[in-house]
């Protein structure tokens, strides 16, 4: 059995997470599937001989969600320090493309990154980084930190600002519907908000309905569409003369729900702060000792058996064994002990700990995903992806939540309209209120 963590995009509520869990758990070869809505991750245990990761990803995409796929073999994106102008870009691209095993090389000056496509049987990351260094630049691996999260947060913030700016004029002129120009402006602004900032809810609702389920997007789409299309029919005079319109209702609902989405993404980003702090403890460079002398290289290029020199104040780049020298090492990252521990020849040291004093020569014994810090990070991610029993109970309830809300909204309408003989518009407003208030981010 293989345990894998996949990043999922496009989830809007706990019902989405539960729907993915049910669909993936039902696949042959999958022993367990747990989706954490807060961290947007799928913790998966499956048998690769029965079902591949690509088939599981395809199933998730068929449900209407996105999967952050790992970088395929033969492709690499990395950071480059030392780029100053377009000439630097041309120089580096030319240097990389000279190698016959390099299919493509694109360097971006604005983001200081490079993307290469190569033959993995002839080249590896160490050789590619060597070419970059020969060209006079410093390559480094990009860490999977909050780039995606910050882009999502920025997108939600921009949609929030847009929907508020478009909705406020409608709110401020809601008592001026007798003015034809104001009515036309309100209709235009409400239409723009409904089918731009509100388009994401229609897409989510359609994906849910296609898969015979109901999510928060269904509630939002129902509530805002009812308000907008009723107002549109009333504005066109199809419901009789003098009918009230309330374009401000649908527009402001979308604006408020966009505010909720923004706050949700912001809170979700903080859920992984501890993990990001752990990742930032890693050293991104190492002083490699070779027959030619000392050479500063990216830590990712260190291999088992390589000799690394660690000076006072530097972070130990890999797990290893001290072969020469002695010094005090701050291991508080691992043990929590504030006092440095004396390390001498034959002692083991842990990557990401700090050499406080003395010069150490360390032979690498564990690198990459095998280091202690990487194992700690993996355990934290698995713990975040797993769910407490109360979360599983809440997810089970949420599968019935949306249908129950729709039924309650219909009951509310019929009670106000028939037994209480309230006007149609009053009963209609109350039923929409039930739908919208039930939305978690409203």
Image (cartoon, rainbow, N blue to C red):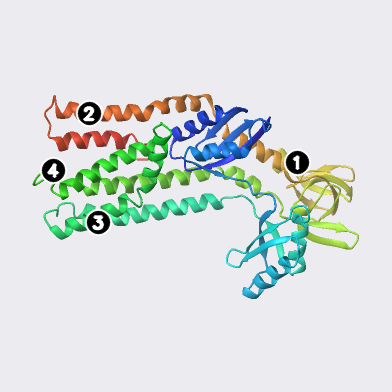
Residue 188, numbered circle: 3
Q: Quadrant of the C terminus?
A: top left
Please identify, in this view, whether the residue under mark 2 or under mark 1 is nearer the observer.
2
Count of picture labels: 4
**Label 3 to label 4, Cα distance in Å?**
20 Å
**Dot 4 surroundings within 10 Å: few (below 14), some, or many (20 or more)?**
some
Tag 2 near tag 1, CB within 8 Å: no
Say whether disc 3 or disc 2 marks the residue closer to the N-terminus: 3
Q: Quadrant of the N terminus?
A: top right
Q: Secondary structure at mark 1?
A: helix
Q: Which residue is mark 1?
A: 370
327, above or below 378, in the image: below
Q: Nearer the viewer, residue 337 or 24?
A: 24
Q: Which residue is mark 2?
A: 412
**Dot 2 surroundings within 10 Å: few (below 14), some, or many (20 or more)?**
some
Residue beneath the point at 14% across and 35% down: 424
Please identify, in this view, whether the residue under mark 3 or under mark 2 is nearer the observer.
3
**Is residue 333 in view?**
yes
């Amino acid at each position: 059995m293989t345990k894998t963590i996949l990043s999922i995009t496009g989830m809007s509520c706990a019902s989405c997470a539960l729907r993915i869990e049910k669909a993936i758990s039902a696949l042959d070869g999958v022993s367990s599937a747990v989706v954490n809505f807060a961290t947007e991750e799928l913790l998966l245990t499956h048998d690769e001989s029965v079902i591949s990761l690509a088939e599981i990803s395809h199933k998730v995409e068929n449900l209407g969600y996105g999967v952050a796929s790992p970088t395929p073999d033969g492709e690499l994106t990395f950071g480059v320090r030392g780029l100053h102008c377009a000439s630097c870009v041309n120089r580096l691209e030319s240097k990389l493309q000279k190698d016959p095993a390099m299919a493509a090389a694109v360097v971006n000056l604005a983001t200081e990154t490079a993307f290469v496509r190569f033959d993995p049987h002839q080249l590896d990351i160490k050789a590619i980084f060597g070419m970059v260094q020969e060209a006079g630049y410093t390559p480094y691996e990009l860490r999977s930190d909050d780039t995606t999260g910050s882009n999502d947060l920025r997108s939600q913030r921009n949609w929030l600002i847009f929907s508020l700016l478009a909705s406020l004029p409608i709110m401020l002129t809601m008592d001026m519907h007798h003015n034809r120009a104001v009515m036309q402006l309100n209709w235009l602004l409400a239409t723009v908000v409904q089918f731009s900032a509100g388009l994401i809810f229609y897409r989510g609702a359609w994906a849910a309905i296609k898969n015979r389920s109901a999510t928060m997007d269904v509630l939002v789409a129902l509530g805002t569409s009812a308000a907008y299309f009723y107002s549109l029919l009333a504005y066109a005079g199809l419901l009789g003369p003098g009918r009230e319109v309330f374009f401000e209702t649908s527009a402001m609902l979308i604006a408020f729900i966009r505010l909720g989405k923004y706050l949700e993404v912001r809170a979700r980003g903080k859920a992984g702060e501890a993990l990001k702090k752990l990742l930032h403890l890693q050293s991104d460079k190492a002083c490699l000792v070779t027959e030619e002398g000392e050479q500063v290289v990216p830590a990712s290029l260190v291999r088992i058996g390589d000799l690394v020199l660690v000076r006072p104040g530097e972070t130990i780049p890999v797990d290893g064994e001290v072969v020469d020298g002695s010094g005090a090492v701050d291991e508080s990252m691992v043990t929590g002990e504030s006092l440095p521990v004396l390390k001498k020849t034959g002692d083991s040291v842990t990557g990401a700990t700090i050499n406080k004093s003395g010069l150490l020569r360390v032979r690498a014994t564990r690198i990459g995903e095998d280091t202690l810090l990487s194992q700690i990070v993996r355990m934290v991610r698995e713990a975040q992806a797993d769910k407490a029993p109360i979360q599983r109970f809440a997810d089970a309830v949420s599968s019935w939540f949306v249908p129950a809300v729709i039924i309650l909204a219909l009951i509310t309408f019929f009670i106000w309209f028939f037994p209480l003989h309230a006007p149609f518009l009053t009963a209609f407003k109350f039923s929409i209120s039930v739908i919208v208030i039930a939305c978690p981010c409203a």
